[in-house]
Amino acid sequence: MPGGSVVDHLFETASGRRAVAIEYHTRDAYPGTEETLRDQWLLDPQTYRVVGMRMLVGEKVVGGNSLVAAAVVDKAGERG
């Protein structure tokens, strides 16, 4: 991934899955602190599909999400 780098390998996500963290964006100091805000994509270590993302201030996780399931269906409201 251009501009990204592996920063954490095989850690457990909030949903209990193992993942690899790829850091792709670092912002200037977080308001009210001297810490940088870092954005990371979380990838499945076997398929390399995105399974979530997280935001860190310094070394503390301050936000993010985890993808639990995804499916392609024929029309809205159907379940995969």
Image: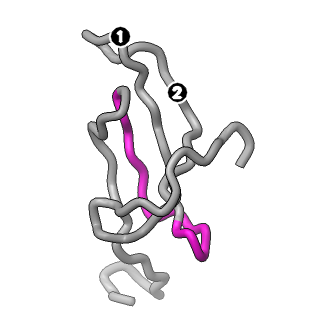
Residue placed under numbered mark 2 in the picture: 26
- At 56% from the left edge and 69% from the top edge, which residue is drawn? 45
CA separation, marks 2 and 1?
Answer: 13 Å
Q: Is residue 54 above or below residue 42?
A: above
Q: Position of residue 37 (x, y in %)?
A: 41, 26
Residue 5, quarter of the rendered image: top right
- At 38% from the left edge and 66% from the top edge, which residue is drawn? 67
Q: Is residue 34 above or below residue 46?
A: above
- At 59% from the left edge and 76% from the top edge, which residue is drawn? 46
Q: Is residue 35 above or below residue 24?
A: above
Answer with mark 2 or mark 1, whichever residue precedes in sequence. Answer: 2
Residue placed under numbered mark 1 in the picture: 34
Asked if the stretch drawn in magenta spans residue 2, the answer is no
Q: Position of residue 8 (x, y in %)?
A: 50, 50
Please rate how many residues cluster around mark 1, counting C-alpha atoms within 10 Å: few if below 14, some from 14 to 19, many from 20.
few
Circles 2 and 1, Cβ within 8 Å, touching? The answer is: no
Residue 48 as seen in the image, left or right of residue 41: right
Residue depth check, mark 2 versus mark 1: number of the one nearer the observer:
1
- Nearer to the camera, 66 or 57: 57
